[in-house]
Amino acid sequence: MITGKNYIGSQLKAGGTKILKTFNPLLNTENPWVFTEATQDEIEEAVALANQAFASYKNYSGIEKAKFLNAIADEILALGDDLLVQYCTESGYPRGRAEGERGRTIGQLKAFADMLTEGSWVQATIDTAIIDRQPAPKEDLRKMLTPLGPIVVFGSSNFPFAFSTSGGDTASALAAGCPVIVKSHSMHIGTGEMVASAIIKAAQKTNMPEGVFSNLIGDGRTLGTSLVKHPLVKGVGFTGSIKGGRALCDLAAQRPEPIPVFAEMGSINPVVLLPNALKKNSQKWATAYAGSITLGAGQFCTNPGLLLALKGEELNDFTEKLDQAIETIQPGCMLHPSIYADFNNGIAKIEEQNGVSRIAQFKGETTPNHGASTVLKVDGKEFLKNAVLHNEVFGPFSILIECENEAELIEVISKLEGQLTGTIISEENEIESHKGIIGALQNRVGRLIYNGVPTGVEVCASMLHGGPYPASSDSRYTAVGIDAVYRWVRPVSFQNWPDHLLPAELQNENPLQIVRTVNNKLTLSQI
Ligand code: NAP
């Protein structure tokens, strides 16, 4: 049952008077539930509780935190069908997507639990003392990663499970030992409340401290701003627009004590289509790209929004086939009328620029909030001159840049803003004669894909989901995979510390049996 209230730790509270409602884009009607925005007092209480919880939670063992994360996964599953129905009602996504995203979310939680159980992620590094070193003795120094403190998480519109209430940011921050306060996304507050109830139940069942998790309802500009400015908050996770992410980065930097904001924002994900690949497999790639551009109504941060190719017969053949393939795919429902309106306005704005023509658009009937998939075209020279053409259009959209030659194609890539992904479609060995393209692409992106599509982000340790700004606010970190935990920790060194007072990870006996670096060698051994 949806209560419409905030979780301040385990307490449901709604002392405020301002309300919010969510929208069912498929039915094109407002949903019935009424959600009460958190008051300033409730915000204060949630942050104070998180800060109090941090004092003990930061010392919980990996095994204890792993039990908590596994219990969250179990409680989410226990919500069963009701949760999936709520997700679909507030997002317009089909049931299959809800199931898939729930599976991914549970998989993420379990992956962090496994990481905690194994324990070596803390990067314990030990340099033992050399008392008789000349001219001065060497001290005993031991270093490991420790949690930052309470973290605020802003979920995204397009992933109500995997990048929201119990998504990667929350799972990685809780794994690190940081309490989490979620600013519930305004488009799926009911889904957020149900997932929050699962986290609270899991916290109670595994004896976590009160305040380790809170879920607050409210508008980004009031609630979100208050949270980011709060002196007890020590870090922020964000997934969404460049405008929103940048506003939060600036706000955090202006605090008396600046804090890190790990924002995953916009990306148009360039795809280079080389001529031999198009000549040999134009149908295969047209079908694959029509599918990738329209997947999830194009509402993926890895959507291939920019196709780059050399002018020629092969490209003309590919664009014809892409048009035919787009026509066969019924548009999906977008998340909200505002996102649908932004999509249409974005296309209109690009279409009115010099030299832009349309090469593919779904021409069948569409119902409200279903965006007609569109591919536009412009030549390399115009693209280089006009920054408007570089803007992301969030939805089933892509623009093809027809380049005169390889030099122009490389120049286009080097003028792009930072991107999450870059893809090369090539016949075997074809890329060997276009090595400049690889170098240019690698400079601008976080993940390089060979003969594939950028949509579909595997959750595993070797995934890098981030990239140079504005793809993310800090290209050194990933938002997906277990390495996401490193956003919420800082290293601390202990010098000449008595063994029994050290954290277990750094004690001589290596009681947790973790891999450590001792005197510059990786080892499981005791000292
Ligand atoms: P968003 O509008 O940036 O919102 C994400 C979260 O941040 C929401 O909870 C929002 O709160 C909050 N927020 C936004 N601006 C804020 C500000 N200035 N101060 C404080 N909080 C703020 O992103 P979204 O909802 O995921 O998507 C909306 C638009 O973002 C799309 O139309 C699309 O153009 C763009 N976008 C999203 C993604 C993605 O991966 N999610 C990727 C590319 C582009 P409120 O909703 O309460 O304001």
Image (tube, helix red, strand yellow):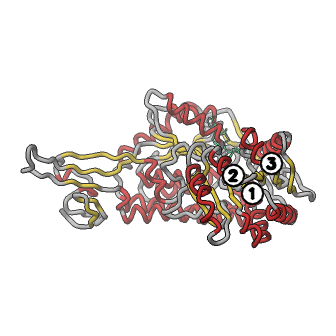
Q: Residue at x 86, y 55 (%)?
A: 359
Q: Which mark is residue 284?
A: none
- Label 1 secondary element: strand
Q: Residue at x 52, y 51 (%)?
A: 170
**Number of numbered labels in the structure image:** 3
Which residue, given by chain and number where applicable, does mark 1 sit on? 310
Which residue, given by chain and number where applicable, does mark 2 sit on? 409
Residue 261 x/y as whole percent: 51, 40
From mark 1 to mark 3, how far is it between C-alphas? 12 Å
227, 140: nearer the viewer: 140
Rendered-image quarter of ligand 1 = top right
Residue 21 x/y as whole percent: 73, 43
Q: Are marks 1 and 2 in contact (CB under 8 Å)?
A: yes
The 10 Å Cα crowd at callout 2, few under 14, some 14 to 19, many 20 or more, is: many
Q: Nearer the viewer, mark 1 or mark 3?
A: 1
Look at label 2 and name its amino acid: Leu
Q: Quadrant of residue 35?
A: top right
Look at label 1 and name its amino acid: Leu
Q: Is residue 239 above or below residue 248?
A: below
From mark 3 to mark 2, how far is it between C-alphas? 13 Å
- Label 2 secondary element: helix
- Label 3 secondary element: strand
Q: Residue at x 53, y 51 (%)?
A: 169
For residue 276, side relative to residue 442 (left or right) = right
Residue 294 x/y as whole percent: 77, 59
Of label 3 and label 2, which has the lower sequence position? 3
For residue 363, side relative to residue 8 (left or right) = right
